[in-house]
Image: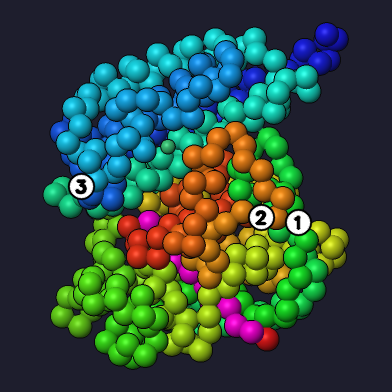
Amino acid sequence: MSTTIERAATGLAETLAATLRDVRDRTLRLIAPLDDAALREQVDPLLSPLVWDLGHIAGFEELWLTRNLDGPIEFVEMPGLYNPFEHPRRERGALALPGRAECVAHLADVRDRVLERLATVDLGPAAGPLLRDGYVYRMVAQHEAQHAETMLQAMQRRTAPPYAPADRREVPAARDHRLAQAGATGAMVAIPGGTYTLGTDDRTAAYDNERPRHTVTLAPFAIDITPVTNAQYLAFIADGGYVRDEWWSPAGRAWLADSRAEAPMYWTLVGHQWRTRMMDREAPIDGTHPVMHVCWHEAEAFARWAGKRLPTETEWEVAATWDPATGAARAFPWGAAAPTAELANIDQRAYGTAPVGAYPDSTSPLGVSGAIGDVWEWTASRFGPYPGYETFPYREYSEVFFNDEYLVLRGGSWATQPDVARTTFRNWDYPIRRQIFSGFRCAADA
Ligand SMILES: [Fe+2]
């Protein structure tokens, strides 16, 4: 091995170690304000007790970064207490789960063994697809980051007392008047019809469901410049959005009757004023922020009320990434640079949304703003494989969830960490779910 290649390999191993460390720092900082009882408590049957997430994170890392590197892949999820298929979320509160000290010690113990191995492992072109370029390390780091977002959903559910973040960062004010105006009115931008690309061929970080990059043909359409704001959503409520059922699909009406919802989750009417709570902050609804904690049925009903519809995930990705000047998709709406706190509201530290127009440099070439961060955006698309899809490295991440019952969400939220906040990333959930940090934007036929 030449010294240049050795140096490159060492550099990559160090980068991967730093990625794993950054994600772990976040996880530990998130749980720092909570005591053992709070960590063990299950606040919602849809969400795990937080110690379960911690044990599962350690188990997944041990499996993929130690055991599965030793030979044929024996397990894709760890057997036992932390296997998500053996123990569905609603049952996890009844499991005999360890306390914080034991969990944190287990996480550290696994990590020590992982780093020891990482120092000598072959990540070069001769390694298999799991190790080549460090793929499996990024997969494990993303897995922990995704669990950290789910843990934040559970933290947002807590009320007595509410979760008090230790490291909140204030979000910027709206700096772009035109974008703020678009957020107030639901202004749209026209996207020409044509041939575009969707997805990626990346094998260093992307999940199997994002591959392969393929060509798509789209009819001309229009799409909202910003996510739908609270101001727009309040107008829907004021117009009888939750009372008149003409805007709701049959499934939406069933959800409405069952849930008796009158507004997004976490909204309360105090006198004549809608108020909301984000973690430990309670305040009147701010009309300039994207609406959050709505389910797909609410998004769809709003779109019908507005005379619009939800975008397909193809329309969403094209509007967020396509650069007509180069005839190619950008990695991010703003270009190739990785997301930072200046470009988008990501990385969890805001513990809530920012006003639309707060990130003027994030606008895509086709004129779409706020695609990355703030709120996951519901789309009209069902979760399925792209043409040419190949499962890698295990069926239980994507393939077993390819199902018409799941709707795709795009773009990440304020609670998404930078490694996961990418334009090709596909999230999915049931259309009735709204404990997730979800909003939407609308589209329309040209
Ligand atoms: Fe998991």
| Mark 2 → mark 1, Cα distance in angstroms | 8 Å
Q: Which mark is residue 43?
A: 3
| Mark 1 → mark 3, Cα distance in angstroms | 42 Å
Q: Label 1 sits on what residue type?
A: His
| Number of other residues with Cα within 10 Å of mark 1, as a class: few under 14, some 14 to 19, many 20 or more | some
Name the residue: 29% across, 83% down.
242
Does residue 419 belong to the magenta stretch?
no
Q: Closer to the camera, 253 or 338? A: 253
Q: Position of residue 202 (x, y in %)?
A: 72, 42
| Number of other residues with Cα within 10 Å of mark 3, as a class: few under 14, some 14 to 19, many 20 or more | some
Does residue 439 belong to the magenta stretch?
yes
Query: Residue 40's quadrant in the figure?
Result: top left
Q: Label 2 sits on what residue type?
A: Tyr
Q: Position of residue 109 (x, y in %)?
A: 40, 13
Q: Which of the two marks, 1 or 3, is nearer to us in this view?
A: 1
Q: Are marks 2 and 1 in contact (CB under 8 Å)?
A: yes
Q: Is residue 26 above or below residue 290?
A: above
Start-end of magenta stretch: 436-445
Name the residue: 41% across, 45% down.
149
